[in-house]
Amino acid sequence: MDLLPDCLAETLLNSVKNNAASLSDDTIWSIHTTLLETALHLRTAHNARQGLLRLPPEVLSEILEDILDPYCSHWAFRPFWRSTETDSSVLIPVTHTCRRLREVALGLRSLWGTLTTKDPHRVPIFVERSRPAPLTVAAWSRHDIPSVFDVFFTGEANRIQELHLCSVEVEHMNYLYELLNSPLPCLKSFTLHCYQTDWYAKPSQLPLSRDRNPSLQYLTLKNTPFLPETGFPTLTHLSLTQVVTGPDLNVKVADLLSDCPRLESVVLSCLSFETVILNGAAPRTPLLLEHLRRVTLHEMDDNALQLYMSLLQPRARDSAYHILGHIFGHNNQRDNPLLRDFLFPPETQKRSEDQPAEESPQLCISVHPDHNGEFSGWDRSYALTVTTREYTRRLATYSGQRRYIGNSVWITQLLAANATRLAAIREVWVVNAAPSTFWPRFLSSDACAPVMSPLVHFPALETLTLVSDHTFFVEGTTQPGLYLLPSTEDPTAVAPKLTALRLMHGFSDHALAKRRATERHVPLADTLDFKQMMEDLRCGDYAYLRDTRLIVQTTPNVRVDRSNLDRLREHFKDVRHEWVDALPAMPVRGEDPARRGCEKWSESLW
């Protein structure tokens, strides 16, 4: 039974309103305060009955942790560092909802531990609310970096666990030196991106050392004129991009690498090519890095590659080695043993010849868009990837770099040069091979000549997978064709004995595809058009597919007409259509560097 019936509550409120004109100011404010307190008690009693707020504090804490949005999940935000930073500001509205949620949110100190320049005026508030939890500091606006530094000169520096600074200018370096010269015992991840590199008057060493930073695990330096004072016995991940320290750069880099015995992942990008040639003192014997399992060399020529490939040789199983944005010389790639042996290390060749089908190497030929999701830009990449149970090797070049290449058919040349090693490959993937991605011009030495199929180099090929990602709206994506398969019209081509042909169509990123469809005013859903494929089959040049099973896999937003499948059954041993939740990809060791778009974002490839 209610203690305060609705009629009594209404009578009391009406009495206050009717007598308000005759009440004194003190009485009015007294009643006002009483009503607010009463409303607060009523709201508290009401909230106490809600299922969400009756949950234990531990469960509510987990819910609040899930509310936090990682910055790296935003498509527009592409961090080149490894971080666990989250957007703590989204919790502020939660603390204004009710007393119960506010108490839980403020009681969980770690929720407030991310400080960014997105809201510099909130930095002191978050510092106070997070105390004594570890801090993650991310400053990617050079105008607000001083305001972040100021906080830590009040005795909070020893709480910093992650420090990520972008676009640091010359006038900010004094702040940085003063901060880094102090002991940072909790620092595990450090990123520094300098806005300018013409700082030769500055010290050539960054004040980071094993003594001041005994816990450092992740280090990313981009566009800097210095390296750390020492190596770190705890460092596991290192990324160096556009580091310029003078003619002894490669000696310093080699010394740093050798002084970090626990390295697992190394990214070297855009290091000075000239110093590799001029500096003969750089070591070339493999470094003893027993835990090394992932190496990325980005935008280097043959001279730089020879040096760093000799230094960095993964010793751990399940390793991944990526050469991205390679600048080819003008020589014929058939005679390039560096790249030939990179894709198929000689020591693994004999083992692969005797392996069963499920353990044999897999190879992927792919075209990937630039970081904006476009295939028309110079950052579009062409890649060859070889993967086994023991390793993954990827070699990629950007379309804009083809101006450096005397012969633009490097993929065909490398495949031809590895003819004996390709004999063991039974499964090949071809990704985004639409005509609009310039494959005919790319794979043929003569733009007017017929397209030479890259599959002629795989005599043991049994399974072929053709993947088309509709996320990026490539012209021709919805029209499956067979033009990449060997044609019996070519007298030099040997028809493969395919047992399975898989066509995969769908969206790798549904959220991005929906956003792009809205921007371009086009429908999100696609319907596969098999007209071109039927014409290819009727011409008789692919009669060898009659003993092949055709498997069509599509994500939910791609439609397939059953009548088309019925017509295809006349040309294949069996035809099957399957729905899949996600667009499949060839399994690789480590993370696929092109999974978030172009390999241009090499520094983030942990």
Image: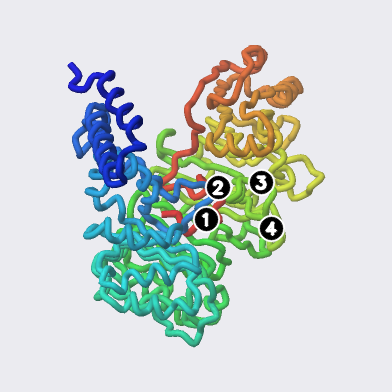
Which of the two marks, 4 or 1, is nearer to us in this view?
1
Q: Earlier in the sequence, mark 3 or mark 4?
A: 3
* Secondary element at tag 1: loop
Outermost residue to the bottom: 201
**For residue 33, what is the image quadrant?**
top left
Q: Is residue 443 above or below residue 119?
A: above
Mark 4 vs mark 2, CA separation in Å: 19 Å
Q: Residues within 10 Å of mark 4 (few under 14, many from 20)?
A: some
Mark 3 vs mark 4, CA separation in Å: 15 Å
Q: Earlier in the sequence, mark 4 or mark 2?
A: 4
Image-based side of 479 in relation to 431, left or right: right
Which of the two marks, 4 or 2, is nearer to us in this view?
2
Viewer-closest of 1 and 455 = 1
Viewer-closest of 93 and 388 = 93
Query: Residue at position x 58%, y 49% from top?
Result: 383
Query: Residue at position x 56%, y 56% from top?
Result: 600
Mark 2 vs mark 3, CA separation in Å: 10 Å
Question: In the rendering, which numbered label is found on residue 375?
Answer: 3
- The answer to whether the residue labelled 2 contacts the one labelled 3, judged by CB atoms less than 8 Å apart, is no
The residue at which mark 1 appears reads as: 601
- The answer to whether the residue labelled 3 contacts the one labelled 4, judged by CB atoms less than 8 Å apart, is no
**For residue 139, what is the image quadrant?**
bottom left
The residue at which mark 2 appears reads as: 597
The residue at which mark 4 appears reads as: 402
Mark 4 vs mark 1, CA separation in Å: 19 Å
User: Can residue 220 be seen from the camera position used here?
Assistant: no
Q: Looking at the picture, how far across and down is residue 156, in whole percent?
A: 27, 68
Which of the two marks, 3 or 4, is nearer to us in this view?
3
- The answer to whether the residue labelled 1 contacts the one labelled 2, judged by CB atoms less than 8 Å apart, is yes
Q: Residues within 10 Å of mark 3 (few under 14, many from 20)?
A: many
User: Can residue 521 be seen from the camera position used here?
Assistant: yes
